[in-house]
Amino acid sequence: MSVMNAAKKRWVPYAFLSPYLLFYLAFGLFPIVFSFYVSLTSWDGIGDKTFVGLDNYKFLFNPDSYFFKSVGNTLLFVVLTLPVQIALGLVIATLLYSRWVKWRGLFQLINFLPYIVTPVAVGLMFNLLFDWQAGFVNKVLLKLGLVDEGIYWLGEPLYARMVIVLMLIWKGFGYTMVFYLAGLANVPKDLHEAAQVDGASGLRTFFSITLPLLKPVTVFIVITGIIGGFQLLEEPMLLLTGSGMGSSVAVIGGPERCCLTTVWNMYDTAYGSTTRYGLGAAIAYGLCVIIAVFSFVGARFYRGDSE
Amino acid sequence: MSKSGGTKRIVVALVLCLLAALIAACGGENSGGANPSASGGTGPNASGGGADTGGTGGGSGAEAGSGGDEQLKGEFVLWTWEPEHPTALAAFNKKYPNIKMKRVNVAAEDVPKKLQTTIASGGELPDVIRIERGQKAKIFDMGILEDLSAAPYNADTSLLFDYDIPAFSVDGKLVAIPDDMSVAGLAFIKPLAKEYFGTDDPEEMEKMFTSWDVFIEKGKEVVQKSGGKVKMFPSLGDVNDILKGQRPEPYFDGNKLNVSALESVLSALVKFRDAGIVDKLDQWTPAWNAAFGGDKYIFAECPVWMPQYVIGPNDKKDDRWALMVPPGGGIVRGGSSHGIPKGAKNAELAWKWIEFTSMSQEGAEAQKTDGVFTHYKKAYEDPSFTNWTWRNFGSQNIGEKFFVDISATTKDMPENINDTYLDEAMSIVLQTLAKDSSFGLEQAMDRIKKELKAKAPDITW
């Protein structure tokens, strides 16, 4: 009887887990292993795969490859966007949490709305706003007499990057705001009251009590922001190539490839202007390593913080 | 103990069932000759009815126009982004009442991607695919299309225009049949031409603009006279389309870049830019579209589809435009073709449809009603067929201009996959040329080499 029970105990969990495990093997583990194998080959998706060893990985370090340029572009966007998103989200959350703001729910919703707009729509919307000749922004600037000729927003590397940073900030600050609102709700009220009794000003209370207690939220936002930032694709892609149609060729990565993100580079290599699946897979693994490093560092921070 | 064994067996059976279901789901429709290499040399078979169609499979285009054929039965699958051509389909069904067409909507730019994923996953390929010119080289390079000049199709290439054959062939094999005419000429705004050149007559304009050098000189005069308000073209991309279309040799011989051909186009582009006769608009942007309704640019490249799809919607005024043969002759711009993937199950049915719509008089007439001019050369021998006017061009017979005058001077070049990489590099170069006046031929060549090295390391020059 006990032997039978032991057997049952051994098998039953596996039986219950098997649907997930099988799905994981088919749609999780197999693609991971297969894409690693593909990264060691030269393959266009149709012909035979030719084993090339680490050549694709070597090419990532070749000065002709766009891998490090695209990583640099992505990092630049993260570095320029994330601090502003955090600051803006924190300020708005603090204002909304204060007693001065009425209709808190409404403002919360209004500020959060950009985050739920689909990236494709965001890209196209900014494309229309910043169009060189027909864009709303240039029309306003010209009407106000601030410029003599429309600014070539999406044709100059510096301006194109500025537009992307602005777009990402606009889209993302609502997300950080929601986290800070949740964080603020967890800050004990008695600490604020005690500070008030001790004569601390509102600003002092914010910097000495609220901000330090929100550190776990900030660390979480930074880690997820970096990981999310490295996956940036649709917004810049639609912004810079959205208006093209038919057989017209849009510039991949924007002017001078200044906005080519790592995922865009991977997509373009494997499925876009070239069909180098092997190199595309190698870029994906390169990106995976970078994200893993940032996640590892972030996790250390997070752990250190909670300890 | 036996009960334990029973439990074990049940668990194993359950797991195996799940695994089998999963594998079955992943396998998809793997039956049939989906493997592109599987039936390279075999003839297509009509499905349903089991009709022996070996004898009719080799019919030429001339045969396609004659009486109906009820023996051919079945359904073929077409990947296309085009809306249905009702007249052409009705005419086809009159001739082949038992052949049905199933349209699967695939965006033009997604066709190569969808082909690749279908092949990689072992899925079933369609019987015929519509191929947009921008994707042509990529799809041709996949090596998945049937040779339509060989048995059982035996396409009669004499039915098409001479310039079609090299453009739709790979290694001497005709792999697609062009569908819509896409020869391009030069359209101009008549009031502007009258004001700056003293004439708005297309023939007189053709005599005046004998070469691009003359064109540039005249352009400088226009810019000077108008105080810079009027220019010749809205975008350097338009100029590149024309100059590229007129290049005397292909850009690539295999992986070898024809440097002199590319340099000659680039140096002409630099000349155009330096003369200040071309504006900086990007093609296909709202501003570029709006330019057709304005009076800032005298000329526009004008493929067959342009009056209907670009000029018409953007210019509400009638009788403002005229069409002429460009200096250096006509070019091919855009357009689509049809190809049959190797291993297509109902290839013969698909071929009958291609043959009827693109290589027969009946098909040409029906397609014309649907707004498409086919590449069936013979149809254009009849002046009443080429008769085509469009409100923006007033009473000018633009059909005759396109299909007789421009077509007679048109050339087309074969392209391979490397041309798509070059096109992408050129788009960067064009953007930089337009905005940076110090960017010259040398820098443009360096930039192109750098881009090509990154995209296709096998290219040599």
Image (cartoon, coloured by chain):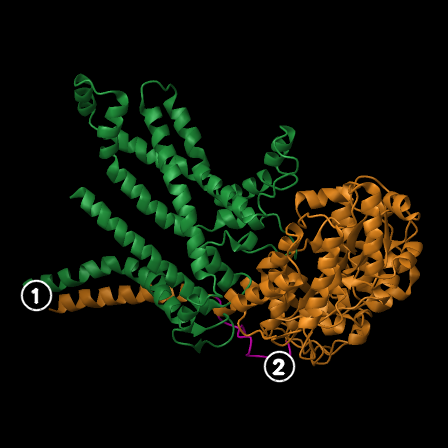
Chain colours: A green, B orange
Vertical order, A201 against B44 (above or below): above
**Amino acid under disc 2:** Thr
Residue to which mark 1 is pinned:
A3
What's the residue at 36%, 45% (across, down)? A225
Residue to which mark 2 is pinned:
B42
Q: Which residue in the rendered view is the most extreme toward the front? A: B438
Per the picture, the main secondary structure of the magenta-coloured stretch is loop
| Residue B188 falls within the magenta-colored stretch | no
Query: In the visual, does B172 lie left or right of B360?
Result: left
Chain ID, mark 2: B
Q: Is residue B89 visible?
A: no
Q: Are marks 2 and 1 on the same chain?
A: no
Which label number is shown at residue B69?
none
Please state the horizontal and vertical placement of residue B205, each as a whole percent of the image.
90, 54
What's the residue at 22%, 33% (across, down)? A213
Q: Is residue A280 visible?
A: yes
Marks 2 and 1, Cα distance to the nearest angstrom?
A: 62 Å
**Amino acid under disc 1:** Val
Please state the horizontal and vertical placement of residue B186, each as a whole percent of the image.
82, 55
What's the residue at 68%, 66% (across, down)? B338
**Toward the viewer: B298 or B154?**
B298
Query: In the visual, does A275 lie left or right of B420?
Result: left
Q: In what quadrant of the picture does the N terminus of chain A appear?
A: bottom left
Name the front one of labels 2 and 1. Answer: 2
Please state the horizontal and vertical placement of residue A169, each as a whole percent of the image.
44, 39
